[in-house]
Amino acid sequence: MKAPTRRGHRRTVLGTAFLIAALAAAGCDAITDTTGRYADDARIELSGTSPGPLVLVSSTHWVYAIDENTGFPYVHLYEADTTEVELPAEKNVALAPRYRILFRVINPHAEEANIRMRVLLDGELKYDAETPIGDMPVDYTFRFQ
């Protein structure tokens, strides 16, 4: 097997940097934990105002992928649980065996919703943000490696 060249390493670093920047720009909170300590469960808490029920998607079976046509990153879902929720709402998800979580909040209404989204892993607050939701969903992703 041929050893990676300096140029190939640079492409890998630039590609990784691009992926992280693009996910951040897309409203994702992409976090990877490499400490070796895995959480057992994830909890989302939603509050705020909405013109009606919101759609909550949760999944532990997903990967980051790159769209071949556009070159932009996205989250490819293999399996997900999708439910309608009225605010305030909360949901717990067991993380084993994949030890990753995606929470996506979608506003299916023409009027904007204003939510506060909190995510806890094993009871420890990892994400807390207030944001409007219009046409674009709000994602939170976390994966252990």
Image (cartoon, rainbow, N blue to C red):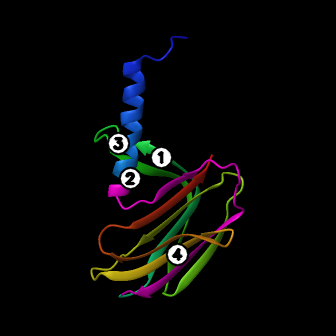
**Residues at marks 4 and 3, CA–CA distance in whole angstroms:** 27 Å
Q: Position of residue 135 (x, y in %)?
A: 29, 70
Q: Is 6 placed left or right of 85 in the picture? A: left
Label 4 is placed on what type of residue?
A: Arg
Q: Mark 3 points at which residue?
A: 18
Residue at (51, 59) in percent of width and height: 141
Mark 2 or 3, nearer chain start:
3
Q: Mark 1 points at which residue?
A: 64
Residues at marks 2 and 1 touching, judged by CB atoms closer than 8 Å: yes
Badge nearest the viewer, 2 or 1: 2
Q: Judge whether residue 15 is colored magenta.
A: no
Residues at marks 1 and 3 touching, judged by CB atoms closer than 8 Å: no
Q: What element carries label 1?
A: strand
Where residue 27 sits, quadrant-wise, is bottom left
Mark 1 or 3, nearer chain start:
3
Q: Position of residue 46 (x, y in %)?
A: 50, 80
Q: Is mark 2 on a helix, strand or loop?
A: helix
Mark 2 or 4, nearer chain start:
2
Q: Mark 2 points at which residue?
A: 23
The residue segment tinted magenta is: 23-50
Answer few, some or many: residues within 10 Å of disc 4's Cα (few below 14, many 20 plus, some between 14 and 19). Answer: some
Q: Mark 4 points at which residue?
A: 118
Residues at marks 4 and 3 touching, judged by CB atoms closer than 8 Å: no
Badge nearest the viewer, 1 or 4: 4
Answer few, some or many: residues within 10 Å of disc 3's Cα (few below 14, many 20 plus, some between 14 and 19). Answer: some
Q: What element carries label 3?
A: helix
Q: In this view, does 133 lie above or below 13?
A: below
Mark 2 or 1, nearer chain start:
2
Mark 4 or 3, nearer chain start:
3
**Residues at marks 1 and 3, CA–CA distance in whole angstroms:** 13 Å
